[in-house]
Amino acid sequence: MSEIDGVLGVAVIGYAFMGRAHSDAWRTVGAFRADLPLVRQQVLVGRDATEVDRAARRLGWAESSTDWRSVLERPDVDVVDVCVPGHLHAEIAVAALEAGKHVIVEKPLANTIVEAEKMVDAARIARGRGVRSMVGFNYRRVPALALARRHVADGRIGEVRQVRISYLQDWLVDERAPMSWRLRRESAGSGALGDLGSHAVDQVRFLLGQDVTEVSGSTHTFVTQRPGEHGAEDVSVDDAAWATLRTSGGAVVSLEVSRMATGRKNSLRIEVFGSRGSLGFDLESLNELWTCLDGAEFPTRVLVTEPDQPYLDGWWPPGHVLGWDHTFTHQAADFLRAVADGDDPTPSFEDGLAVQQVLEAIERSGTPQNTSDARPEVVR
């Protein structure tokens, strides 16, 4: 490590929603894990000098900058955390890795497979120099979902046969909701499919420990125009997506994502059915896991707050629940542990590319020329 005075200097690129969430994680990770390297919130980067300076002071950063390239040249920055729109991920991440900085990139890894492959190539080269990289699928760090993965890996629900996963939100239901970068293909890559579907696909791969091999799906845009700065503007991404996936282990997955699901604010629901049991999870009750293990007849509600369960040993006494924000703290802790130990953190850029390949296959399968073709898309 190239840390100064035994402390890793961190730079976060972006100060909006994800930039704030990641800033909170870097501010709290030392309290969660005293055995990890110390971090210094060195610099917050954004385009607007006044706004990023205000955000930096509010979020605990030592300073702010509007030039991410100059930040990569600084010896007091060891970790670069990329929290900007998807079309900027590849350029910043590749440059940071080439500059010898450890890199975290918010999900999805990139907007296209070509960009993701460039990032994977850069990560592999950097890995040979001891430089680490990770994509930020924070829901892997929900204690209940980490426990669910453990139960699957231990064979406690038997052979996984069927998965149901949905991620539903409603923030675009109102047709008057304004245009944003998330609704433009050139900046977002895709809509609900990339934003929410990337989490869903990653959870399938994470929980089952299997790859997705085939997909059959469709996408839809319910509101095709939104109010823009200069009048109505065409929406160029999907509002919702549906897919059936098949995995390398023979499981069949039903997947649905939407930003038009009235009444659903942030509803990630997962059910995993095996030959000897099942598991159930709802992000809106994120400290709970419903388990039916080892051939049991009925499911049991488990409150995941015990110190022997994943991620809980550094926090509060049993029964004291954690929140959504803690997942980012766990993510930062896992990343720091990997850097300190010289290990490769997960999920890797290769994992991010695998998710991108599934998303693109879903989109291909839903194009008009494919709608009459019953054959599923092979993930490649």
Image: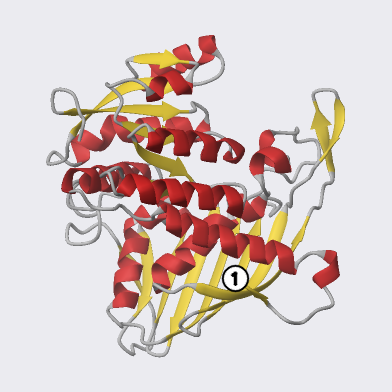
Looking at the image, residue 165 lies above or below residue 253: above
Q: Is residue 277 left or right of residue 359?
A: left
Residue at 40 percent of width and 87 percent of height = 159
Residue at 85 percent of width and 69 percent of height = 369
Looking at the image, residue 186 lies above or below residue 343: above
Crowd around label 1: few <14 · some 14–19 · many ≥20 (10 Å): many
Amino acid type of the residue tagged 1 in the rendering: Val
Number of numbered discs overlaid on the protein picture: 1
> Which quarter of the figure is the C terminus placed in?
bottom right
Q: Residue 81: in sight, yes or no?
A: yes
Q: Nearer the viewer, residue 275 or 62?
A: 62
Q: Could you tell me which secondary element the residue under label 1 belongs to?
A: loop
Residue 198 occupies which quadrant of the picture? bottom right
Q: Is residue 379 left or right of residue 279?
A: right
Looking at the image, residue 50 lies above or below residue 43: above
Q: Nearer the viewer, residue 22 or 70?
A: 70
Residue 283, image x, y percentages? 46, 56
Q: Which residue is mark 1?
A: 379
Residue at 60 percent of width and 51 percent of height = 114
Residue 316, image x, y percentages? 20, 46
Q: Residue 109: in sight, yes or no?
A: no
Q: Is residue 77 left or right of residue 208?
A: left
Looking at the image, residue 348 lies above or below residue 152: above
> Which quarter of the figure is the N terminus placed in?
top left
Residue 320, image x, y percentages? 26, 49
Residue 93, image x, y percentages? 46, 38
Q: Is residue 317 left or right of residue 378?
A: left
Residue at 36 percent of width and 75 percent of height = 291
